[in-house]
Image (cartoon, grey):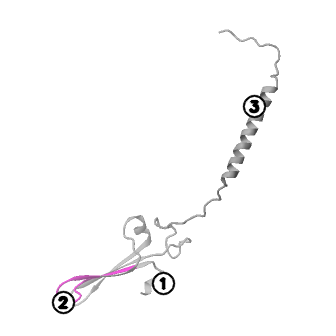
């Protein structure tokens, strides 16, 4: 509970050994979100193991804490998780009428340029003889 209140995303405690009686057991206690595999499991999980010597035998305690994302990298990793999705606002889409008007304007300009090219005579200098290879 204290770990979760300290801004951790998840926590898992495993206690193994002779807890009650002669038989060894393992008890798991978990809370929150915990990724154990992959690169995120290595970067975001902080783990500690301690062995406690009791009269009946050894008890092992393993605590894993899933750290929160911290862009500055002080309280946790600065690398964002792979499953975090950020939705960006869509770009404003032009209406179909404006697209059609732009296409008509471009076609009109192209036609005017073709008319101007056809009407203007080519400037020709002295005749150039082609090399006959």
Point out the residue furthest to the left here: 22
The residue positioned 49% from the left and 70% from the top of the image is 77
Q: Secondary structure at mark 3?
A: helix
Q: Residues within 10 Å of mark 3 (few under 14, many from 20)?
A: few
Placement of 77 over or under 26, stated as above or below: above
The picture places residue 57, in percent across and down from the top left corner, at: 21, 86
Q: Which residue is mark 2?
A: 21
The residue positioned 51% from the left and 76% from the top of the image is 75
Mark closest to the chain's N terminus, 2 or 3: 2
Mark 2 touches mark 3? (CB < 8 Å): no
The N terminus lies in which quarter of the figure?
Answer: bottom left
Q: Which residue is mark 3?
A: 114
Is 34 placed left or right of 119 in the picture? left
Which of these two is toward me, 25 or 110?
Answer: 110
The picture places residue 28, in percent across and down from the top left corner, at: 30, 81
The residue positioned 60% from the left and 61% from the top of the image is 90
Mark closest to the chain's N terminus, 1 or 2: 1
Q: Secondary structure at mark 1?
A: loop
Which of these two is toward me, 130 or 54?
Answer: 130
From which residue to which does the magenta span run?
11-27
Q: Nearer the viewer, mark 3 or mark 1?
A: 3
Separation of disc 2 and disc 3 at Cα? 98 Å
Q: Which residue is mark 1?
A: 6
Q: Is residue 22 magenta?
A: yes
């Amino acid at each position: 509970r204290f770990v979760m209140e300290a801004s951790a995303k998840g926590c898992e405690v495993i206690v193994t050994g002779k807890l009650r009686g002669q038989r060894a057991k393992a008890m798991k206690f978990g809370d929150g979100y915990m990724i154990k595999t992959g690169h995120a499991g290595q970067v975001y999980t902080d783990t500690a193991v301690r062995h406690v010597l009791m009269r009946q035998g050894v008890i092992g305690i393993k605590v894993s804490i899933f750290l929160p994302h911290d862009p500055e990298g002080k309280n946790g990793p600065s690398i964002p998780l792979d499953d975090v999705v950020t939705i960006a606002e869509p770009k404003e889409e032009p209406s179909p009428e404006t697209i059609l008007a732009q296409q008509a304007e471009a076609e009109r300009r192209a036609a005017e340029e073709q008319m101007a090219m056809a009407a203007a005579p080519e400037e020709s200098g002295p005749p150039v003889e082609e090399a006959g290879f």
